[in-house]
Amino acid sequence: MKKLFYSIALSVLVAAGSSCKKVDNYAAPNVTLKGTVTDAGTGKSLQTEQGSGTRIKLLEISWSSNPTPFYVSSFQDGTYQNTKLFAGKNVISAEGAFVPLVQVDDAGKTIVDKSQTVDVKDVTTVNFSVEPFLRIEWVGDPVLNADGTITTSFKVTRGTADPNFQQNVSDVAVFVNSNNYVGNNNYDNRYTPKLSGNDANNSVGKTLSLTTLGGALPGKRSYFIRVGARVSYGLNYYNYTDVKEVKVP
């Protein structure tokens, strides 16, 4: 009896394996989708966090009218690329620290739709122009002080005139790290100064100067500095400057 059960089980496994071989005959995905999310006010790429800031949303409508979303994360310089997609028609939008490209009212009706319907094939480029919640600008380069600290000057302004997206500024920070992938998801809290609450909200339109915490920074290395600020909306993503490097002898 045991031999009979074993033979039946083995036959089922062989049949299942054969069935899988017949179905799994699709070519590997080899289509590239790439592009840049830019600030509509400056024309510059919109700085974000590596892997956890701006993301590109794809809805493939080639085979379904209700597809599951697929997301591509942007690099921190605002560009994105995925080289392993299948060809197909997609509705594509971007999500992040900017006025939403797709908006719905309280009843669930779409009232704004700036998504793009694109046949993604070969190498396809799709760019987006957006209004950031905040715009942070350097005022000069970070300065290495005589006491071994670093002082950074910058200005925070509104990136959109739409009052629906001018919530209070909840946080401002000068993120410091020992590598150039620096931001709210990757920084050294021993040195990073922050503003919050009223101090952060009252900073809009002013030139600010913040100095690193913890006294003299350890020498003989580079530090990478980036200013971020965010409003109380959605997932509370930060808007950023680009990254500056300061070498401490």
Image (tube, grey):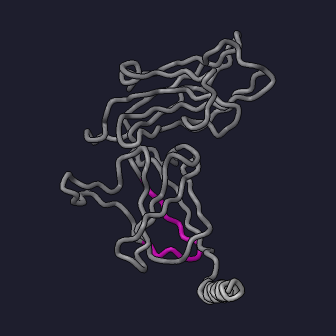
The overriding secondary structure of the stretch rendered in magenta is strand
Q: Quadrant of residue 150?
A: top right
Residue at 53% of width from left, 66% of height from top?
125
Residue at 49 percent of width and 59 percent of height: 71
Quadrant the N terminus occupies: bottom right
Q: Is residue 32 above or below residue 50?
A: below
In percent of width and height, residue 216 lies at 70, 13
Q: Hey, which quadrant is residue 170 in on the image?
A: top left
The stretch drawn in magenta includes residue 234: no
For the question of whether residue 126 can be seen, the reply is yes
Instruction: Report whether 53 appears left or right of 179.
Output: left
Instruction: Give me the residue at 40% from left, 18% from top.
Output: 199
Give the x, y percent position of residue 173. Answer: 51, 27
Report the front residue among 206 and 169: 169
Residue furthest front in the image: 1
Quick check: 102 above or below 203? below
Q: Which residues are magenta?
A: 118-129
Q: For the view shown, which residue lies furthest in the left direction?
A: 107
| Image spot of residue 213 (x, y percent) | 61, 16
Describe residue 132's horizontal placement relative to residue 188 as left or right.
left
Identify which residue, 216 or 241, lies in the foreground.
216
Return the residue nearer the eye: 91 or 37.
91
Expressed as whole percent of the image width and height from the top left, the position of residue 50 reads: 58, 46
In the rendered image, the quadrant that contains the C terminus is top right
| Res 34 → quadrant | bottom right
